[in-house]
Structures are given as structure tokens and as C-alpha cells.
Image (tube, helix red, strand yellow):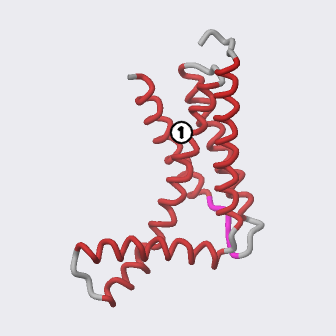
Amino acid sequence: MNGRLNVTDKFAAILSWILVVIWMAVIFYFSSQPAPVSNDLSQNVTKVIVKGVSNIYDIEVNCAYEYVHNLNHIVRKLGHFTEYFVLALLVMNAFRQSGVEKFKLCIYSLFLCVLYAISDEFHQLFVPGRAGQVKDVFIDSLGAILGIFIYWIYTQS
């Protein structure tokens, strides 16, 4: 792009940023849930995964419940990773639609995603039963890095 956006490009850029804000609101919503609600949600997701696997492999009911208990933490952390993977894809697209090019695209996107991850963990300090954790910022950042990398590779070809 030459730095000047026509009307169609401006609309695409605005729409892209609206999607970023919506996704940030989704992340904020999940982070606003008190610990028991958040844990119940991730346990339900874990149960669906274990049930799907138990339909393929013969797993006893007692073992399935043990798997839910053991896998729940992993599912929660994968949730963090996935939220920020998607955020990075959306942010990369929004910056690109806004005319940001090349290396700046990755730097700006990473900065925004990490900054939002930090603010999200800070926000959780004020949610009952939740805690802001530095390791979650790292997990979020890894999701964002993978999203940025995949977006970059996909748009270069």
C-alpha cells in the first residue's frame, strides 16, 4: 500500500478494528467470570473432549472422570493460548488493512497483544477467586507469537 487508503480500504480497516475490539471484549468477558464459573466452563469443555476420545477409545467411566480432573488445567491454559492466537490474527489483519507494512506489522501486533495480555491479568486481580499470573501472560504471548507467525507466512505467499 502507498499509505493512502481509498473508501473500500478504509471500510475494511474499520471493520477489521471492530473485530479486534469485539474479540478483546470476549476475552474480557471470560476474564470477568469468577473462578467457580470459569472453572465450570473449562471442566465442561474438558468433559466434551474426554467424551469424544472415549467414543473412539474404550475408556472406563472412572478413568474418564480422572482424565477430566487431570486435563482441566491443560484445557484452561490452551484457552489462554487460543484466545491470544485469534487476537493476533485479528490484530495483524487490522494493522495490515490500516496500511502498516512489513516488520512494523509484526512489532505493533505483538506489542498490542502482549499489552492486552498484561492488562487482562491485571484485570483478573479484581475478579473474585481469580489471580493475575505472569505465566499466563507468557502463555498468551506464545499464542500471539504463533498467530503473528502464521499470519505472516500466509500473507507472504
- Residue 58 lies in magenta, yes or no? no
Figure quadrant of the C terminus: top left
- Specify the amino acid type for callout 1: Leu
* Above or below, 142 relative to 96: below
Q: Main secondary structure of the magenta part?
A: loop
Rendered location of residue 101, percent (x, y) = 58, 19
Dot 1 lies on which element? helix
In the picture shown, does residue 110 fall above or below 31? above
Q: Which residues are magenta?
A: 129-133
Place residue 29 in its image quadrant. Answer: bottom right
Apparent side of residue 74 relative to residue 25 in the rendered image (left or right): left
Q: Which residue is mark 1?
A: 89
Which residue in the rendered view is the most extreme toward the top?
Answer: 2
Crowd around label 1: few <14 · some 14–19 · many ≥20 (10 Å):
many
Q: Give me the residue at 64% from left, 28% from top.
A: 12
Tell whether 34 sits left or right of 109: right
Nearest to the observer: residue 125 or residue 53: 53
Compared across the picture, whether 128 is left or right of 87 comes to: right
65 in relation to 113, above or below: below
Q: Residue 125: horizontal and vertical position, in percent?
A: 74, 65
